[in-house]
Image (spheres, grey):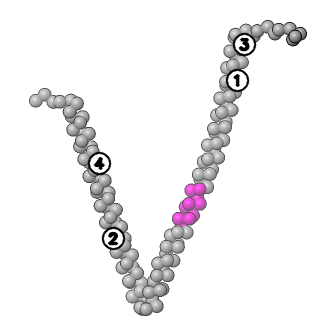
Amino acid sequence: MDERPEAAPEPTGELLRRLAADLGALVRLYGRAVREHLQGMARDVATAVLMIGAALILGIFALGLAVALVVLVVAIWLPAWLATLLVLAALVIAMAVLVFVGVRRVRRRRQAWAAKVAEEIRWLRSLFPSEN
């Protein structure tokens, strides 16, 4: 048998005060944990953005070197100025094709969006028929 005397139950007001204090401490701890998590995540994202930016810059340099390599390879068979002109022409043609395809896709998307907006306007007008 338990020989300890039974403790008197705490008053409800005291229990509610302790509960509120514990909940407040829990919310503060949770807030601190979320803040530390977000700070760490922001630090990681900033580092990743810097690394990706550096990689993109290196990629631009690599692309320039690749073009120079193509010019030098073509210069084996042709004079240097003609090799450069030929590679330049190929790049301009490739750029023109990419721009043409991109503009066509944007126009197609814009036409689809305009048709969707027109359909929505017709639907809205059908909700409020005009009395003429």
For the residue carrying disc 1, how many other residues have a C-alpha within 10 Å: few (<14), some (14-19), or many (20+)?
Answer: few
55 falls in the magenta region: yes
Q: Which of marks 4 and 1 is nearer the N terminus?
A: 1
**Residue holding disc 2:** 96
88 relative position to 31: left or right: left
Q: Distance between the residues labelled 2 and 4?
A: 26 Å
Which residue is denoted by mark 1 in the rendering?
22
Amino acid type of the residue tagged 1 in the rendering: Asp
Q: What residue type is labelled 3?
A: Glu
Residues at discs 3 and 4 in contact (Cβ within 8 Å): no
The numbered mark, 3 or 1, whose residue comes first in the sequence reads: 3
For mark 1, give the secondary structure: helix
- Which badge, 2 or 4, comes first in the chain's sequence? 2
Q: Which amino acid does label 4 sit on?
A: Trp
**Which residue is identified by label 3?**
14
- Residue visible at 56% across and 56% down in the picture: 49
Q: Say whether residue 130 is left or right of residue 53.
A: left
In this view, 98 is above or below 2:
below
Which residues make up the magenta segment? 48-57
Majority secondary structure of magenta residues: helix
